[in-house]
Amino acid sequence: MIRVLVIIPYEDLIPECEAMIDAVRTEGISFSTACLYGTDSDLLDKLRSFDIIVARGMTCRALRHMHPDIHIVEIMMTGSDILDALCIVQKEYGKNAKIGVILSTEDSFSFESLRMLTGMDILMEIANDEDELASVIRKFEEQGVSVFVGGMTLSAYAGKHSMNYVPLRTGHDTMEKAISDAALTAKSLDRERMRSDLLKKAIDSFPYCVLAVGPDRVVMLANGLAEKLFSGRDIVGKSIDLIYPAALFDMAQEGRMTEIVQTINGQEMYVQQQIIGDSGTVLITMQKLTSFYETGGKILQSNLKEKGLIARYHFSDIIADSISMRQLIAKAMRYAQADGNVLVTGETGTGKELFVQSMHNASQRASGPFVAVNCAALSGELLESELFGYAEGAFTGARKGGKIGLFELAHHGTIFLDEIGEMPIQLQAKLLRVLQERQIMRVGGDDVIPVDVRVMCATNQNIPELIDKGLFRRDLYYRINLLMIYIPPLRERGNDIGLLFRHFVNLYAERMSIMPPPVDNAAISELQRYKWQGNIRELRNVAERIVVLNGHDRITAQSIRNIDIPDSEFLVPASSSFQPDIVHKWKRGGDTAELYDEYISSGLSLSDFAQHMGISRTTLWRRFKSLPGNTVD
């Protein structure tokens, strides 16, 4: 129901205004009337429950200032209303009376024309509230004004101070137009509310949070899940910076969707945002990470479990806190919803298969099989028969009845070709045909078998370099990297090192049935200094080693430095200015005595020297102890 208040200037106009209201009254619109004047804030504050208010003069101006969210329809003052008042002045006070007209706005008619038309001495001033009104009255009195003309606020003032006063009355046509305009505004507002209610009901039915934010960064629209996410508050009309300070609006570009995984009020959320049109409005959607892949269907068939053709990992298993990784997770989640081939690149140990399995489990193929094969672990002939299967009698030793291939096993699911860069180039041609034709032929067979398979690949090699060397087909590369993901090495994700290390420490402590040892921040800082050539796999091994060695004791920076790590460049300082020739000689097999001489001349402690050399203190101590006459303790 749209509530309309008509503030009638004079009580004797009430019957006439009621008749005007009856003529425009419509279902869904409720009209009320009142006689009030002035700009008293306590009085006007009581009117906030109305949707539309019809008012004039100072009251109209004050309402617009106090209630910018309410539609205000102004009863305009006309030249005819002024002429009617001047005629009364001339009749009651004579043509020679000096007249002071006080209005709340400059109207379109010319007072100079009124002076010429009436031949009367007329002064005019603007007053927006009671204080300005009193000031104008004093000014007019000093100028010899004998009669005042104005609205109801002036009428009340004049009554208290025994002043000559003629009211500016609103004409029938003016009042009728204002009420008619209010009715039209109410109908328009009612339609707008109906559309808004329908839209609100629609977005409330979405299984994820929805926010629309205007160019002024104020929330224009929010569904129930969004309000619940932000502590159940009414967030419409609030600044997005107050309720969601982590919003990355600077990343959004017109027409382009950006996504990221963020922790919002303690919940892991997949966030998408996009600028809509040229209005600057940003549409934001947020979905719980745990439910993101569930929407794609995640009921694994029992026979797949029995055969082990399942992907065990989900996006919720990826531990990351850095912005780059959270954006990468969001990108991979979007790729999961597509069905194109995916190529995941990155150094060894960065978690490529973790991403591949997560994408499968978040895809529409999640209920289908997930088949993984390491292309580097099998010879060319064996890999071909594993991928495509073979017919009975295809070769000596072939089983009776032949064998189904991995592509057939992956039908309606995903096949993961790990270390794709190691695939023999002769086999690459056959794989390319499968990708193009979506059908396979078993080794030694002549039947064409259609397959519906999504192909995901991973490699730690630079495939463009392999192409230049003639070791990888360019056309196959274009086929497998329709969607590409590069996972950065751990050394470029400093914020993730501490998070991952503590996770692995807790994991291995639990497996050993001991209390997880506390990890000092200094220990994390020590870990962040290394390059981590083996990436997360290497960090995980270090965590396991230190739990075994330390037990439940606190893990300190010295604990990290004291780990007995094999001499294999396992830990290398990430940023060190110490690069003597001995480092390079040592890596090329230099003798221990020369290394010991360098240690003595450096003046460094054994721990610091070992750190610069990129080997553990324990390993260095063991090497030096074998030398005759050494002074290492």
Image (cartoon, helix red, strand yellow):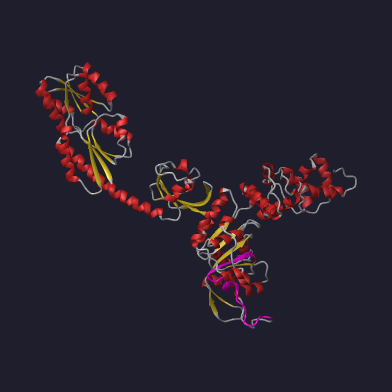
Residue 485 percent location from the top left of the image: 56, 57
What percent of the width, then of the height, locates residue 396? 68, 82
Q: Residue 326 versus residue 205: which sits nearer the camera?
A: 205
Q: Residue at x 30, y 29 (%)?
A: 40
- Would residue 97 appear left or right of 290 to someone viewing this image? left
Query: In the picture shown, does residue 212 fall above or below 15?
Result: below
Query: Magenta span has 145?
Result: no
Looking at the image, is 207 positioned above or below residue 525?
below
- Report if residue 418 lies within the magenta region: yes
In the image, farthest residue toward the right: 628
Can the viewer see residue 57 in this picture?
A: yes
Q: Is residue 629 above or below residue 376?
A: above
The residue positioned 61% from the left and 68% from the top of the image is: 308
Tell me the quadrant of the picture where the C terminus can be found. Answer: top right
Magenta stretch in the rendered image: 397-421
Question: What count of labels does the image hold?
Answer: 0
Depth check, front residue: 553 or 314: 553
Q: Position of residue 143 (x, y in %)?
A: 21, 17
Image x and y of residue 219, in percent: 41, 44
Q: Quadrant of residue 300?
A: bottom right
Whether residue 533 is visible, yes or no, is no
